[in-house]
Image: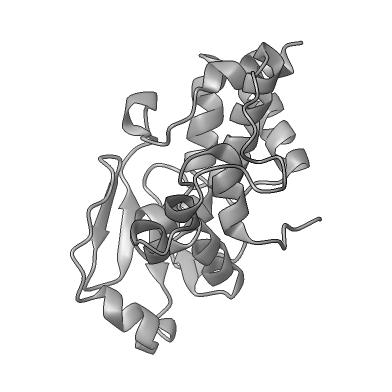
Amino acid sequence: MSRYTDANCKLCRREGQKLFLKGERCYSTKCALEKRNYAPGQHGQARKKQSDYGNQLREKQKAKRFYGVQETQFRNLFDKAAKKSGKTGDNLLIMLETRLDNAVFRLGFAASRKEARQLVTHGHFTINGKKANIPSMEVKAGDVIAVKSRSQQSPKFKEIKDMQITVPQWMDVDVNKLEGKILALPTREQIDTPIAEHLIVELYSK
């Protein structure tokens, strides 16, 4: 599967808003969007009138980049969301939120979703006591996500024990044990990612 290898800050500049891809740097004055609040490239500062299709495409790209999902993965998720009962856009966001890498990020065990994917891939977590090293794994209500006992000795996770972590309403976290629980699947109202999902639905409905 293809992987984006260029500078992450270019993605934020292209979308015109912070995607929080680099953890603490995104909250500091070092953020590239603070210094150059325009799209990358020689035509980045040119004013462009966006068409309806352009707005829909940008919203899809933004969603992909927020959650670190590639094109094929995203399309497959959309197709699954469309087959479920309820609103397709809501289903899509809920499926993105319940990916393991996003859950690890939401629990405060990683500074960004990109770091969360790396930590998951390297095998630092378990789900209900079982090995979990696939970032796209879907978490369910009642699942317990925990840092492996061996991994808890690393400086990265020792720091977390001293942090004050706030998690979404659909989660609970025990910082001392370095484990979190999925209390329920999130509702659309509980997802704060700034995405206009109806534009994505319109794009794929063409």
- Position of the C terminus by quadrant: top right
Q: Is residue 131 visible?
A: no
Q: Is residue 112 visible?
A: yes
Q: Residue 86, how many percent across, how many down?
A: 51, 14
Q: Which residue is rendered at x = 27% and y = 50% of the image?
A: 167
Residue nearest the observer in this picture, 90 or 132: 90
Residue at the right extreme?
1
Q: Position of 23 compared to 174: left or right? A: right
Residue nearest the observer in this picture, 105 or 23: 23
Q: Residue 180, how many percent across, how many down?
A: 32, 59
Picture layout, residue 166 above or below residue 95: below
Q: Quadrant of residue 47?
A: top right
Picture layout, residue 74 above or below residue 101: above
Q: Position of 58 compared to 158: left or right? A: right
Q: Which residue is rendered at x = 52% and y = 56% of the image?
A: 101
Q: Position of 201 compared to 97: left or right? A: right
Picture layout, residue 30 above or below residue 62: below
Q: Position of 31 compared to 202: left or right? A: left
Picture layout, residue 86 above or below residue 109: above
Q: Which residue is rendered at x = 37% and y = 65% of the image?
A: 24
Circle count: 0
Residue nearest the observer in this picture, 202 or 81: 202
The colour scheme is one colour
Q: Residue 42, how many percent across, how many down?
A: 72, 46
Q: Residue 134, how many percent across, how many down?
A: 62, 60
Q: Which residue is rendered at x = 43% and y = 86% of the image?
A: 150
